[in-house]
Amino acid sequence: MVSQQTVRYITELIIDTARELEENPFAVPVGISARHVHLSREAIDILFGRGYELTVFKGLSQPGQYAANETVGVVGPKGSFKKVRVLGPARPQSQIEISQSDTRTLGISAPLRESGDLNGTPGVKLVGPAGEVELKGGLIIAKRHVHMSPADAAWFGVKDKDIVMVRADGEKGGIFTDVVVRVNENYSLDMHIDTDEANAFGIKPGQKLTLIKNGFNFKEGLR
C-alpha cells in the first residue's frame, strides 16, 4: 500500500513539473563538463594494472555513464594537469576532453570535435599509478551538444545531428550557436558545455536554458 507521504511527494513532483513546463515548455537542463578522460580497456590495464576495474564515484546525467574515483595525469609539451577525472565505462578508444583554456596550459592545439570523432587529433601522455601511456591521438575540445531521447526530439521537432541554438538568460546571458543534437533511446535530456563556455555566460550546473530552432524561439512562438 502506498503511503500518504509517497502520494504527496509524487503529487508535488507532478505539480512542479507542470509549472516548469508552463513557464518554459522548451527548457533544457545544462551540465558543465570539466576536463576529463575516457579510457580504453588497454589504457586502463597499463595505467592501473591488468584487469583493473574502474570504481564509481557518482553517476552522470546519461544512463550508465559515471565519474570514476580514478584520476590520471595529462601531460603536454608545455605543461600538465594532475588528477584529471576518468569517466566510465571503458570505451573502444581513449579520448581526452579539455577546454580552450586548457590547451594553453598543455601547450598543444586541440580541434573542436564531436565525441568519438578522433581522426587526425593530437595525442598526449597519460600518467597513472601503474604506468604511462603515450597516446597518438584522442585530444579534443568537445562540441557543445544536447542529448535527447526520441520522445524529447519529437517534442522539440528536431532529429539526430540537427544544429540548433540555445539561449541562456541572466546577467551574462546570450545565445549558444552551432549546438549539435544527439538523439538516442538511451539518452536523457541534457545539454553539455565546457567550463570556458559556462564561465562566459555565467551558467551554473542544472540551470535551465531555452532551445531555439532555426532562429525560432519556441517559448515566444507558442500559440
Image: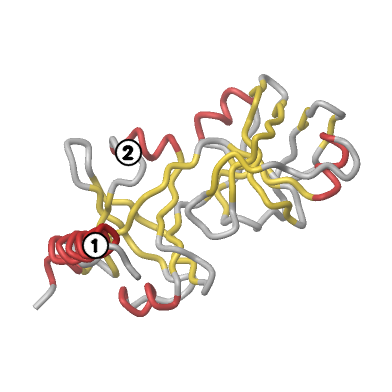
The answer to whether residue 159 of the structure is visible from this angle is yes
Q: Nearer the viewer, residue 183 or 70?
A: 70
Q: Secondary structure at mark 1?
A: helix
Give the x, y percent position of residue 115: 60, 55
The residue pinned by badge 1 equals 4
Q: Which numbered disc covers residue 132?
A: none
Give the x, y percent position of residue 110: 61, 40
Question: On the picture, is 188 further left or further right than 5?
Answer: right
Q: Nearer the viewer, residue 149 or 166?
A: 149
The quadrant of the image that shows the N terminus is bottom left
Q: Amino acid at mark 1?
A: Gln
Give the x, y percent position of residue 210: 25, 58
Q: Residue at x 65, y 57 (%)?
A: 116
The answer to whether residue 217 of the structure is visible from this angle is no
Give the x, y percent position of residue 199: 35, 33
Residue 66, placed above or below residue 187: above
The quadrant of the image that shows the C terminus is bottom left
Disc 1 from disc 2: Cα separation: 35 Å
Nearer to us of marks 1 and 2 is: 1
Answer few, some or many: residues within 10 Å of disc 1's Cα (few below 14, many 20 plus, some between 14 and 19).
Answer: few
The part of the image, by quadrant, that contains residue 49 is top right
Q: Residue at x 61, y 44 (%)?
A: 140
Residue 185, placed above or below residue 105: below
The residue pinned by badge 2 equals 204
Q: Nearer the viewer, residue 108 or 99?
A: 99
Question: On the picture, is 164 further left or further right than 90?
Answer: left
Answer few, some or many: residues within 10 Å of disc 2's Cα (few below 14, many 20 plus, some between 14 and 19).
Answer: few
Which mark sits nearer the N-terminus, 1 or 2? 1
Q: Residue at x 78, y 49 (%)?
A: 40
The part of the image, by quadrant, that contains residue 22 is bottom left
Q: Residue at x 69, y 53 (%)?
A: 118
The part of the image, by quadrant, that contains residue 164 is bottom left
